[in-house]
Image (tube, rainbow, N blue to C red):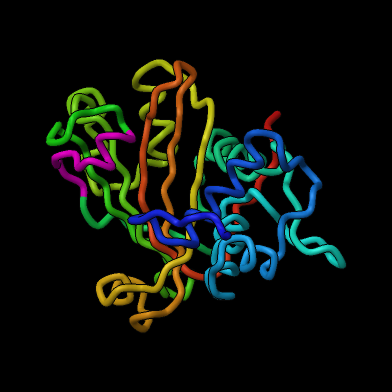
Amino acid sequence: MPPKLERPAPPYRQIADAIRGRISNGELQAGDRVPSVRSLMREFGVAIATAQRALTSLRAEGYIRPERGIGSIVTTEDERGRAANDRVDKSRRTGKVYPTGQYAKIIDAALDEATGQVGDALGLKVGSAVIRRVRVTYRADGKPISASTSYFKGDLAERAPLLLSTERIREGTFAYVARTLDRTVDAWQDQFEPAAATAEQAAELGLDEGDLILLGRNWIYDNAGDVLEYGESITFGRVTYRGRLGD
C-alpha cells in the first residue's frame, strides 16, 4: 500500500520533503542515486507529472543533480552551499549582487506588517513592523526576469534608513544591514519550487497565465545565527549564481 499523502501540502511537495528527509538523515548519501520518476510513481501512488515535479523541485533547491547514464544523484553539502557562498562573497568583494547583463529596480520600499510566513522567517509576531523592499530584475534588453520582495525587522528603520529608499544600495541590502549591526554575513539558504503562474504573477513577468515559474524563498543569516534578510521571489527560466570564493 503506498504511503498516505496528507493535505494541505501538494503531493509533489510531500514527495520532495520525503526525499529531502532521507538525505538529511543519511539514508541517501552524496552520490547515491535518487529514486526515478517511475519508482516514485509506484512508491507514492501518484501520476507521472507529480513525480517529475517533485524531482524538479529538488533539483531547483540543489539537493540533487542529473548524472548522465544514471539518473539523478544526491549532491554534496559543498555543492549545495557553493552557489550561495559565491553570491554572498561576490557581493562582499564587488558590491554587485546581480550577474553580468542584469539589473534591478526597487519599485517600492515601505514599512508594513508581518504576515505569518514573514514573521516566522524573521522571528517576529504577526502584525509586527517590517520593512518591505520590492524589486524587479531585468535583462539588458529590458525584459523582466524576476520579481522579489525582501523583508527586514522594522526596528532597523532608524538605524538603516536606506532600506526605506528606492535608491540602490550598492553593497547589497544584507551587507548593508550586517555592517549597520556590526555583524558579518555567515550563511545563505535558498528554496525554489515550480508552479504555474497566476494572472498577477504572469503580468509581472510578461508571461502567459499558467506558464511555468519558480517560487523562491531565501534567508540570509549573520554570524549570530539571526536572519538579516528574508525574501520571496518569482522567476522563470534557469537560475544561476556564479562567483569565486574570496581572497
Assess whether residue 114 is covered by the magenta stretch: yes
Percent from the top left, x then y, of residue 206? 35, 78
Q: Residue furthest bottom?
A: 208
Residue 38 vertical placement versus 89 (above, below): below
**Image quadrant where one finds the C terminus:** top right
Q: Quadrant of the N terminus?
A: bottom right
Q: Residue at x 19, y 42 (%)?
A: 115
Q: Quadrant of residue 246?
A: top right
> In the image, residue 187 lies at what x, y percent?
53, 30
- Between 148 and 116, the one lying in front of the other is 116
Q: Which of the two residues, 9 or 135, is positioned nearer the viewer here?
A: 9
Residue positioned 23% across, 23% down in the render? 159
Q: Left or right: where does residue 143 sit relative to residue 190? A: left
> Would you say 231 lies left or right of 98 here?
left
**Closer-to-camera residue (101/195):** 195
Please state the extent of the stretch shown in magenta in the rendering. 109-121
Residue 135, how many percent across, how many down?
32, 55
* Count of numbered badges drawn on the protein: 0
Horizontally, residue 191 falls left or right of residue 161, namely right
Q: Is residue 126 magenta?
A: no
Kindly identify the residue that appears in the image at 21 percent across and 53 percent down.
108
Residue 218 screen position, x and y as percent = 44, 44
Decide if residue 177 is in sight here.
Answer: yes
Image check: 202 left or right of 143?
left
Q: Outermost residue, right direction?
A: 69
- Relative height, residue 59 to residue 109 (above, below): below
Point 60% across, 69% down: residue: 52
**Is any part of residue 100 visible from this angle?**
no
Which residue is at the front of the view, 70 or 111? 70
